Image (cartoon, grey):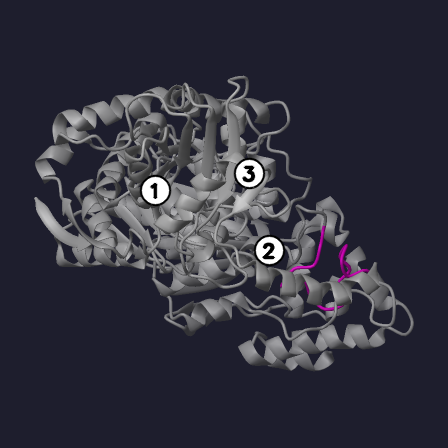
Amino acid sequence: MQSQILHFPAKEAVIKHQQTGDLTISNRLSDVDDSLQGKPERANSLDSGHRACQGCGEALGARHAIDTALDATDGELVVVNATGCLEVFSTPYPESAWRTPWLHSLFGNAAAVASGIAQSMKVQGKENVRVIAQGGDGGTTDIGMGCLSGMFERNEDVLYICYNNEAYMNTGVQRSSQTPGAARTATTMPVGEHPGNSFGVGKSVPKIAMAHGIPYVATANICNPRDLEAKVRKAMSIRGARYIEVFVPCPLGWGTASCDTIKVARQAHNCGLTPLYEAEYGEITAVSKIARPEPVKAYLKSQRRFAHVFKKGNEHQLEAIQAIADANIRAFDLLENPAQGERF
Amino acid sequence: MLKQMDGSYAVGEAVALCRPQVVSCYPITPQTHIVESLGKLVKSGELADCSFMNMESEFGAMSACIGSSAAGSRTYTATSSQGMLFMAEAVYNASGMGLPIVMTVGNRAVGSPLNIWNDHSDAMSVRDAGWIQLFVENNQQSIDVHIQAFRLAESLGLPVMVNMDGFILTHAYVRVDMPEQEQVDRFLPPFQPFQKLDPQDPVTMGALVGPEAFTEVRMLAHKRMERALDVIPAQMEAFANIFGRDSGGLVKKHYEGEADTVLVTMGSVIGTAKEVVNELRDQGESVSAVTLRTYRPFPTEALREAVNGAKRVVVLEKSFTPGMGGIVYQDVVAALAGTGIEVQSVIAGLGGRPVTRESIRTLFAGCDKRTGFEVLDLDHATLDREITRESAVLDRII
């Protein structure tokens, strides 16, 4: 049977823009381009016409990730989706925006369903068919944690991608285990003595994944799609359990302008709140440096969920968030030029 | 081949003869020996081309089955009790997607209080999940019905649950006739999925379905269930032609002819019940017994036919809904509506309490004066004492 997935012809189209780091530049400045970004031949795995909000970081992240995986596997890909925005906006019956074989089962079981598919393909001798499971932070780091950990521990041949937008957006912006301290959600309202979400000790699922000793773990940020693409491509070159967490702003839940998704994501990266790194078998192998560091203030200022942080009397919240960013900068040695850190 | 073996290992061997491609496992008493036996068969290579998955929970175990079946492999798992409740969300999901998974349930009570022994609470907790629910009476049927279950599931596009009484059957060493591989292969063709996850032919499975189509999807499941009422007897016949045994089917009428009082049961309790019915028939009493071998879809017509001519039907069941009473009873009442047959409700064997011949004699003796539901062998003294003790506190709140 003829494949219905678009394949990728050799590079021939004119490339107008070039992604380098987290900046887009004209290709006048560079004649090298190994990226899938912006090419007309890209698979469009998540096709246009879906119902995501304008400026949805998750839709952007998913399209980049799955396009890359399709390219890396020559279209031999099956995608499992946890319940959540991505699932709901892409497959309202009788429509589907997916060009891949795609299955949604439940909120908390994508990792286990994907495990079953991987084993099923293997036993049928179809090991060329690769499996990706994907979900939001709620479906991954909260309700899906048990199945995810099982998938890691058994070292199933599955890439799990978590699109982290730091709350339960699909149900109306409730707190998740990834919601940062002070952030306003529908269940952590900015009222009382400690407005917004309380400061816990956090839950780093990439580190939990690393503790399982799986072959590959990476964090990515939608502000740098080329880096995301490289990480997905690398993940698809490896067999066994792999985990990528992509930082994806949610304009609706965060109270940001639809046109600012990339900008906000870049601010998060530049202030050190979302360190980008790769790890193999539990050891960190690469860290993306911050070229133009910023204080957290600029990042927080652009989001209504943190508006109360700037009110008089809540300075301690701002300081607490800055302290988290500073700790990340130290722990991951994030600054390209360490001297720049001193201005905060 | 005749063998003396425990029920769980017998089921394990029978399932292996069906050539499952993926078996997912999570231990829970009393089904554990089933997946243990399959694990050994896969590890030793006796069951080839099969992936045995040790999962992190029952929820994960059923979820892996969903993925495996959707990707086109013949898929099996087993559970009991709390395990069934923990996987319940995925149990509904599997049937909604029309995935022909076969699952054994070593039937066990559901706590609290914690209780590992047999009753049918676990099966009843997912009664409405859209799975075909078969109940077996003995270990020979456990073997035979599992072989039929795979063909049934795959020919209908519905998951099938084979219920066998925990401990009473799973742990009983009895002589069974284990079919030959050649016979099973003749009965059960390789799995040909209706649709599957295939990069060459992409499909979207598990879409979001709104009010405009959800009812139709549910009715589609109902129509498949109705079709099962024809397919189950046909496959029972096909099975008998190859294996020479009458196993499975919708209902089993254990005695020829009509009787005034007919006992209706499910599962292994018929073994004891038949001894008492034989006794009573020898004494000239007009009694008989019928077993529901298929509970979902409910075999309304077959039951009406089987109890035709009765004045009274007594439903003896190992399940109970607090605030109402018998569960199977309600189905039987609905099925016999308009026949003029009186239906009585008797509950026994909860949490593994033995249903003895004496209990069943009491059941028949009470037929003339029974109103509402009756619980056999109930310790009234303990119950009354606790009610008094609780009342002393609770009455103050009112």
Query: Which region is colored magenta?
Result: A173-189
The answer to if B76 sits in the magenta stretch is no
Could you confirm whether marks 3 and 2 are on the same chain? no
* Left or right position of B191 against A160: left
Q: Work out which quarter of the rendered image holds the C terminus of chain B and state it.
A: bottom right
Q: Are marks 2 and 1 in contact (CB under 8 Å)?
A: no
Among numbered discs 3 and 1, the one appearing first in the sequence: 1
How many numbered discs sit on the rendered protein? 3
What crowding class fits label 3: few (fewer than 14 Cα within 10 Å), some (14-19), or many (20 or more)? few
- Chain letter for mark 2: A
The answer to if A179 sits in the magenta stretch is yes
Identify residue type, mark 1: Ala
Circle number at residue A138:
2
Pointer 3: what residue?
A: B370
Residue drawn at 9 percent across, 39 percent down: B180
Helix, strand or loop at disc 2? helix
Residue drawn at 41 percent across, 56 percent down: B352
What crowding class fits label 2: few (fewer than 14 Cα within 10 Å), some (14-19), or many (20 or more)? many
The mark closer to the camera, 3 or 1, is 3
Identify residue type, mark 3: Arg
The percent position of residue B182, horizontal first and vertical second, equals 9, 35
Which image quadrant is residue A138 in? bottom right
- Main secondary structure type of the part rendered in magenta: loop
Pointer 1: what residue?
A: B273
Which image quadrant is residue B390 in? bottom right
What crowding class fits label 1: few (fewer than 14 Cα within 10 Å), some (14-19), or many (20 or more)? many
Identify residue type, mark 2: Gly
